[in-house]
Image: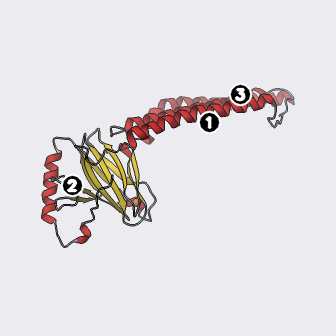
């Protein structure tokens, strides 16, 4: 009988080992494909690589911890399963050895690893994400964002460089910005909470009714990128997306001149609805 149990156990280990080996081999081969298909798009902002590196650090630390726990669980299971007459031993983990072990693991996970991630994250936030250029910084490109169910309204200053003037370029679900200049947002909402999400720029910021939130990024690549809403904001939330066009430095002035001229031509002083600009907030 014991011989039979042992044979069955060995057969089970082999039965598990083959698909596991196949799975590992195919995982390694297609890991790049999985990252390309399901992973984030390459960062397109100047601060994007910082956040990707933080994300990789967290993923690596969690991955290593997961593997250690997996090995600690699997080794005794596989090793002792085939032993004759070996019975499971239940333990409350109250011995001094167990308490010491628990304390060491807790210190490593909660103090060493978490503190490491926290210090890195706070540094990235302070030096990049929250380091919004002041409104009087030369060369910044100001954008006012008014979110609503279910569209993004954008206002950019036009050729005069001033917001709230007749040549402001007002667009819906389309935003055109220059490369290499800090783009600074003032965001608010007409109705419910929305969240401006520019995944390629690694930027996400809530737009709250009754408040003006500030955010910024600087594009490092030109091209067309997604604008999304990252806050469930009603039944047509899924429709709340647009396009961010990042133009090369040489092309932007011509685009802005044309867009400003169109805005001036369409300007209607009696259309108070169209004039939703506000005093810029730092
Ligand atoms: Cu929304």
Q: Cβ(mark 3) to ligand 1 < 8 Å?
A: no
Query: Between residues 251 and 124, which one lies in front from this camera angle?
Result: 124
Q: Is residue 136 left or right of residue 107?
A: left
Instruction: Name the quadrant containing residue 281.
Output: bottom left
> In 3D space, how far apart are the residues under numbered discs 2 and 1 (Cα atoms)?
48 Å
Q: Residue pushed farthest bottom?
A: 270
Q: Residues within 10 Å of mark 2 (few under 14, many from 20)?
A: many
Q: Which residue is mark 3?
A: 75
Q: Earlier in the sequence, mark 2 or mark 3?
A: 3
Q: Residues within 10 Å of mark 1 (few under 14, many from 20)?
A: few
- The image shows residue 23 at horizontal and vertical percentages of 57, 33
**SS label for mark 1:** helix
Residue in the picture at 21% in, 54% down:
157
- Name the residue tied to disc 2: 157
Q: Nearer the viewer, mark 1 or mark 3?
A: 1
Residue 59 on image: x %, y %: 52, 35
Q: Earlier in the sequence, mark 1 or mark 3?
A: 3
Q: How is the image coloured?
A: secondary structure
Query: In the structure shown, which secondary structural element does the residue marked by tag 3 occupy?
Result: helix
Residue in view at x 77 percent, y 31 percent: 98
Q: Quadrant of the N terminus?
A: top right
Corner quadrant of residue 67 = top right
Asked whether the viewer can see residue 217, the reply is: yes
Residue 10 in picture, x, y percent from top left: 74, 27
Q: Are marks 2 and 1 in contact (CB under 8 Å)?
A: no
Distance from disc 1 to disc 3, alpha carbons, whole Å, reads 25 Å
Residue 36 visible, this angle:
no
């Amino acid at each position: 009988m014991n011989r039979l149990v042992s044979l069955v156990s060995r057969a089970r280990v082999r039965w598990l080992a083959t698909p596991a080996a196949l799975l590992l081999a195919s995982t390694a081969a297609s890991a790049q494909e999985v990252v390309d298909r399901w992973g984030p798009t390459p960062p397109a902002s100047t601060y994007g690589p910082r956040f990707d590196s933080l994300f990789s650090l967290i993923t690596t630390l969690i991955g290593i911890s997961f593997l250690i726990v997996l090995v600690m669980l699997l080794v005794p299971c596989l090793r002792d399963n085939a032993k004759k007459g070996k019975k499971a031993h239940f333990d409350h983990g109250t011995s001094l050895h167990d308490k010491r072990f628990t304390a060491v693991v807790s210190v490593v996970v909660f103090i060493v690893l978490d503190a490491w991630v926290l210090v890195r994250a706070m540094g990235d936030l302070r030096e990049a994400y929250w380091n919004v250029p002041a409104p009087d910084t030369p060369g910044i490109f100001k954008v006012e964002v008014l979110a609503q169910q279910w569209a993004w309204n954008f206002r950019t200053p036009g050729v005069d460089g001033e917001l709230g003037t007749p040549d402001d370029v007002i667009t819906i679900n389309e935003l055109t910005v220059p490369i290499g200049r800090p783009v600074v947002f003032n965001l608010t909402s007409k109705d419910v909470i929305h969240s401006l999400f520019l995944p390629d720029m690694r930027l996400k910021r809530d737009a709250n009714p009754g408040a003006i939130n500030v955010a910024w990024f600087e594009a490092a690549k030109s091209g067309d990128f997604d604008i999304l809403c990252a806050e469930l904001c009603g039944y047509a939330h899924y429709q709340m997306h647009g396009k961010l066009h990042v133009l090369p430095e040489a092309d932007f002035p011509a685009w802005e001149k044309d867009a400003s001229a169109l805005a001036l031509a369409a300007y209607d002083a009696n259309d108070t609805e169209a004039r939703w600009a506000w005093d810029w907030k730092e």
